[in-house]
Amino acid sequence: MTGPLVICECFARDGLQHETVQVATGDKVALIDAMTEAGFPRIEATSYSHPKRVPGFSDASEVLAGIKRRDGVHYKATCPNPKAVERALADLEQGHGATELSFLASATESHSQRNLRATREEQWARVEEMARLADGKFRLVGVISVALGCPFEGPVDPGRVVEDVARFAALGAELVTVGDTVGTGTPTAVRVLWERFAREVPEATCVAHFHDTRGTGIANCLAALEGGATHFDSAFGGVGGHPSEIQYGTGRTGNVATEDLVSLFEAEGHDTGIDLDRIMRISEECERVLGRPLDSKVARAGLLPRRAA
């Protein structure tokens, strides 16, 4: 690859969806601004979820209006349905829209019906409508949940995931996030899957989004890198995962901790373009906002030393 690895910071959306505490709009804005200053090229800023169903994101428009933007940085909002895209378009017309919209699909029928309240084909019909409504005004990001294992159906056919990536790409998605929702992926399976993406859907850029439920998150990120991945998702403190009201899976459901992932990539000689000193200060602020210690290892032990040339 040329250029730095691309890490999308997901604390403000995927991270906070798992929290029961309500984070103040001003705190969200301040954290996103700090992430921008630290050098993150992509930041998941909010979700246009229904305000009554997910009240933690009822301030989506206020967050997007309040942040200080930097040229070249993408600010992403999740859209679960066509109404959400209409809200995104309204904010765009007001001059404070997201630059990326993510649309959701599940790799299995059971997860789609329980998590999205729709069959796979019903959800894909929604995605097609949402892509039509977006009308080229945003960078589109497809999201495939349970791509490496389903809590209801078990192992997932990698061929189906490859087909879903191709389906998103055909709808105009520049990026496709491939999620290990319950943390059952292993490094070998991840590496092989990313090698298939490169062979079978080279037009798609697939984003590695791994949950650390079983302690394999960072190992899977390295395996994806070996398989050709250049884009990764993570969240400060390892927060996030599926929404708190979803009752499947056990143990910690959080994302890979940004602090740990950036520290490892940089120690291994991979450029991320992210300021290591700044991320340590942001890590402290995320803990302050949530009022508890989070799960980053380097937040406790310090950054890894850089590998000698």
Image: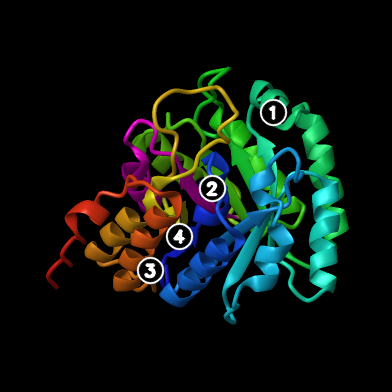
Q: Tell me the crowding category of disc 3: few under 14, some 14 to 19, or many 20 or more residues within 10 angstroms, Cα based.
A: many
- Going from N to C along the chain, the mark reached first, 1 or 3, is 1
Whole-number angstrom distance, CA of label 2 to CA of label 4: 25 Å
Give, as a three-letter code, the residue at label 1: Ser
Q: Which residue is mark 3?
A: 272
Q: Tell me the crowding category of disc 1: few under 14, some 14 to 19, or many 20 or more residues within 10 angstroms, Cα based.
A: many
Judged from the image, the secondary structure of the residue bearing numbered disc 1 is: helix
Q: Which residues are magenta?
A: 205-226
Whole-number angstrom distance, CA of label 4 to CA of label 1: 27 Å
Nearer mark to the viewer, of 4 and 3:
3
258 magenta-colored: no
Whole-number angstrom distance, CA of label 3 to CA of label 2: 24 Å
Give, as a three-letter code, the residue at label 3: Thr
Judged from the image, the secondary structure of the residue bearing numbered disc 4 is: loop
User: What percent of the width, then of the height, locates residue 16?
Assistant: 54, 47
Nearer mark to the viewer, of 2 and 4:
2
Q: Tell me the crowding category of disc 2: few under 14, some 14 to 19, or many 20 or more residues within 10 angstroms, Cα based.
A: many
Q: Are marks 4 and 3 in contact (CB under 8 Å)?
A: no
216 magenta-colored: yes
User: What percent of the width, then of the height, locates residue 71?
Assistant: 59, 82
| Residue ID at (49%, 59%) | 9
- Going from N to C along the chain, the mark reached first, 2 or 4, is 2
Q: Which residue is mark 1?
A: 112
Q: Tell me the crowding category of disc 4: few under 14, some 14 to 19, or many 20 or more residues within 10 angstroms, Cα based.
A: many
User: Between residues 19 and 307, which one lies in front from this camera angle?
Assistant: 19
Q: Are marks 1 and 3 in contact (CB under 8 Å)?
A: no
Whole-number angstrom distance, CA of label 1 to CA of label 2: 22 Å
User: Disc number at residue 16?
Assistant: 2
